[in-house]
Image (cartoon, coloured by chain):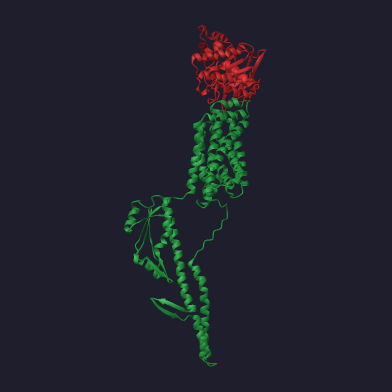
Chain colours: A red, B green
Amino acid sequence: MADPVTAEPEAPIAAVLQADGLTKRYGDREALRDVSLSAGRGELVAVIGPNGAGKTTLLSILAGIQPPDSGSVSRAPEEIGWVPQQAAVYGKLTVRENIELFARLERVDDPAATVDRMLDLTGLRDRADDQVGELSGGNRQRVNIAVGLLGGQPVLLLDEPSAALDPRQRQRVWEFILSLAEAGTTVVYSTHNIQEAERHAQRVLVLADGELLFSGSPRELERAVERERGPVERGDFEEAFVAFLRQRGH
Amino acid sequence: MRWLLLKDLRILRRSPLLVGLLVLYPVVIATLIGFALSRGPDKPQVAFVSLVPESAQEIELGGERIDVTQQAGPLFRAIDPVRVKTREEAIAKVRAGDVLGAVVVPEDTTRKLQAGLEPAEIEVFYNAEDPVKASYVRDTIKAQVSDANTALTKRYAKVALTFLDLIATGGEYNFFGRDFEVLGLQRSEQILAEARRGLPAGSPAREQVDSVIEFARLARENLDLSDDVLASVGTPIRVKQTQLDGGSTPLSSFAVAIAVSVSLMFITLLLAAGALALEREENAYPRLVRGLVSRTALLVEKAGLAAVCSLVVVLLMLGGLGLFVDLDWGRSPLWVAAAGAGALAFAAMGLAVGTLTREVRAASLLCVMASLPLTFLALVPSGSVAPALYDVVQVVSAVFPFKPTLEAMDSALNDSGGILVPLLHLAALFVAFGAASRLGLIRFAQR
C-alpha cells in the first residue's frame, strides 16, 4: 500500500478529533484500510472519493455507529455530533417535537430553550409546528442537522449533507454549517460534490477503495497533480481530483 | 425511554387510519373466528315425504297405538323440512340443489314395524354440494334415526315383557276383540301341586308331575329375570360420558377466549414489529443507539408500548363481550394476568420479527402471514390428524405464544384448568424471543 500524499502534519497540535489505523471488512471486502486522520478546532474537513470508496463507512465508524475491526477514534460517540445522509428524524412529529424529543434524550439542561435556539439557528421558527414529513428535503435536512447539534459536541460529522437538495436549499444548509465552524465546531463531512469540497473545506481527504490517498487542502491536491502531469486548468478542482485518482490507478 | 414511549404514542395518535385498522382488523377476524366456532351450521333444508297411507300411520304395540309420523318430530326440529308428495319429487329437489338431502319413508314402513319380523327401512338422499352441511345432514338424520330406533326398541321390549309376564303369571289377553284367559306358569304350578297331592304315595305319575312342577317353577323364576334382559336389549348401548382432560368450557366462552387471544396476537405483533422497524425506516435507530438509548431499553420500550396498547384493547373488548356472554367478572385480575403475559410474549415475538424484516411493510406482512397458520395450528383438535402429525403440531404450537395465550385466557375466563403452566410457558417464550430480538439488533442497522 502506498503512503497517502500528506500535505501537512497528520496530527495538528490542537487535534479535536483523531483516528488511527481504522480498518473495516465486510466479509472478504475491505471497506476501509488503515485510515488515519485528525482535525483541529473549527476545521472543515471534506471526505471525497468515488462510489464505494469508504466515505460513509469512515464517518459511521467515527460516529460510533459501527465499530472498526482495528484502529481507534479519540472521542466517544457521545462527544461527536452526527448527521446521517438521510434525515434521521420522525416524519409524523413536528419540527419542534423532533428537536425537543432528541434534546430530552440528550439530557440537555433546558430543552425548551434549546428548542428555541435551534429553531432560530435553522431558520425554521415559522415551520416549527409543521410535521417534518411535510417539509421540503432542504428543511428536513436542516432539522436533521439541528438534531445532530443538540448535544453541543465539539465535533460534527455530516454524511453528504447536501445530497438531493436543490441549489437554493444547498446554499442555505452550507451557510448554516459554515456558521457552526466559525463558532469553533470541527466539521467533517463527506460529499460527492467536488465543488462543495473545494469551496468549503480547509482540508480534503481522498478515499478510494477504502484507502486514504490524500490529505491536504484543495490547492495542495491540485499541486500534487500538477507535479506529475503538468498544469491543471485554474479553478477546475474536479479535473484535478479525477486526474489524481487516475494517477493512482482508480 | 419515557420520551420514546410518548413519541410513539404521539405517532400512533397521528395515524388514525393505521390505529383503526390495527384495532378493527384483529377484532373483526377474532369475532368471525369465535362466531364460526361457537355457531353450528344453519338448519339444512331437507325434503321429506311419507308414503305411508294415512289409514296405516298407526301401529299397535302392546295395546298402545303409536302414530309413526310423530316419531319424526325431533328430526323436524333439527332440520328445515320441505314437505313433498312423492319420492321422485324429493330426489329431484336434491338433484337440483334445492335441498341438501331428502328423507323418504316407504309405504310398507308401518307394516314392517307392526310385524316386527324385519326392519323397516327409510331412504335418505344427500346433496354433497356443501360438504360441511352435507355432513351435518348425514349426522343429524343418523342421530334421529338412531333415537327413533331406540324408542321403538323399547316399545317392542315392553310388548315382549307383557307377553312374558302373561306366560309367567297368567291373566287375560285380548286378541282381535276377543278375550282369552291365559293360565300362566304360576297357576299351572299351583294346579299341578294340588293334583300331585291327590296321587297315591309312590305312584310313578307323582314323580312325573314333580318334574313338570319343577320345570314350571324354573321357567317362572327365569322369566322374572327377563325384565332386566329385555331392558338391556331396549337400550343395547348406553353412553356414559366421562371427561378426562380440560375443563368444561361453554363454547361461547371458549369463543371469547379465542377472540381475545387472536386480537391480542395481531395487535401486539403488528405494533411491536412495526414500531421497531419504523425506527430503522426513519433512520433514527443509529442516532438513538449512539448513546441516547441502549438497545435493550429500546426493545423494552417497544415491547411495553405494544403490550400496554393491546392489553387496553382486549380488556375493552372483554368488557364489550361481557354484555353478550356470561363472564365471571370476579376473575378479572386473572384476565389481566393472562392477557398481560400473552401480550408480553407476543411483543417479544413481534420485536424478533421487526429485527428480522427491518421494514414496516415486510414486518406487517410477516406478522399477518405467520399469525393465521399459528392460530389454526393451535386449534387443531387431537384425533383429527395422525398422531405423529399431531405431535408436530403440538411442538410448533408450543414454540409460539398463541396456544399458551389461549390456554391462559381460557383458564382465566372459564376456570378450565391451571393458569400457572401457560403463564410460565409465556414467560419462557418472552425470554426466548426477547433474546432473539436482542441478537437480531446486531445487524439491524445494516443495509
In the depicted view, which residue is nearer to us: A244 or B329?
B329
Q: Give the tally of numbered discs.
A: 0
Residue B57 occupies quadrant:
bottom left
Q: Nearer the viewer, residue B446 or B167?
A: B167
Residue A3 seen by the camera = no
Q: Is residue A171 left or right of residue A17?
A: left
Task: Identify which residue is drawn at 50% across, 69% down.
Answer: B231
Q: Given the current orientation, which residue lies at the most extreme right position? A: A13
Q: Position of residue B96 (x, y in %)?
A: 33, 51
Position of A3 relative to B243 (above/below):
above
Q: Nearer the viewer, residue B401 or B417?
A: B417
Depicted B147 relative to depicted B415: above or below: below
Which residue sits at x=52%, y=28%?
B14
Res B277 seen here: yes
Q: Is residue B413 left or right of residue B37?
A: right
The spot of residue A183 in percent (x, y) is 62, 12
Look at the image and tell me in which quarter the N terminus of chain A lies: top right
- In the figure, residue B257 lies in which quadrant? top right
**Residue B165 at x, y = what percent?**
48, 76
The x and y percentages for residue A178 are 58, 12
